[in-house]
Image (cartoon, rainbow, N blue to C red):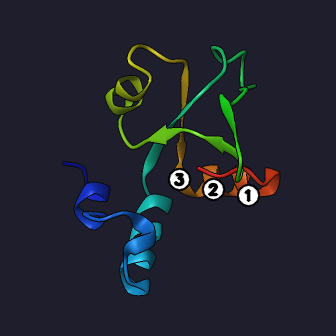
Amino acid sequence: MTPLDALCAVPFHDLPDAARARVLNRLADTEIFIALARDPEGERIELRLFDLPSGRMAIAADAEDRLADFFAGPVAHAALPGRALAQMLAAEGIAL
């Protein structure tokens, strides 16, 4: 169990406001592994995005093995602070 797991025992959107704020704080301070479309080229990355009815979404996890488990195998990824990842995705209108 990771620190994020401990804070999010139920789905995020079902949590009370104070609990959601704690999860977001922890997420901002956590190294997050985000799935890439291909291996990074220098400092350039291309996110692996999914088009859903609600919009575009990126997939990330708080551990490399969890990301690989989600995709049922190795996946190109980048590690970013949660805060930096959130800013990057928000600027593009991409959900996480």
Q: Is residue 59 shown left or right of residue 7?
A: right
Q: Amino acid at mark 2?
A: Ala
Helix or strand or loop: what does disc 1 sit on? helix
Helix or strand or loop: what does disc 2 sit on? helix
Which of the 4 quarters of the picture holds residue 72?
top left
What residue does disc 3 label?
Answer: 82
Marks 3 and 1, how far apart in space? 12 Å
- Do callouts 1 and 2 mark residues in contact (Cβ within 8 Å)? yes
The one nearer the camera, 14 or 47, is 14
- Do callouts 3 and 2 mark residues in contact (Cβ within 8 Å)? yes
Image point (54%, 25%), residue name? 77
First along the sequence among labels 3 and 1 = 3
What residue does disc 1 label?
Answer: 90
What residue does disc 2 label?
Answer: 86
Helix or strand or loop: what does disc 3 sit on? helix
Marks 1 and 2, how far apart in space? 6 Å
Residue 74 on image: x %, y %: 43, 14
Q: Amino acid at mark 3?
A: Gly
Residue 88 on image: x %, y %: 72, 50
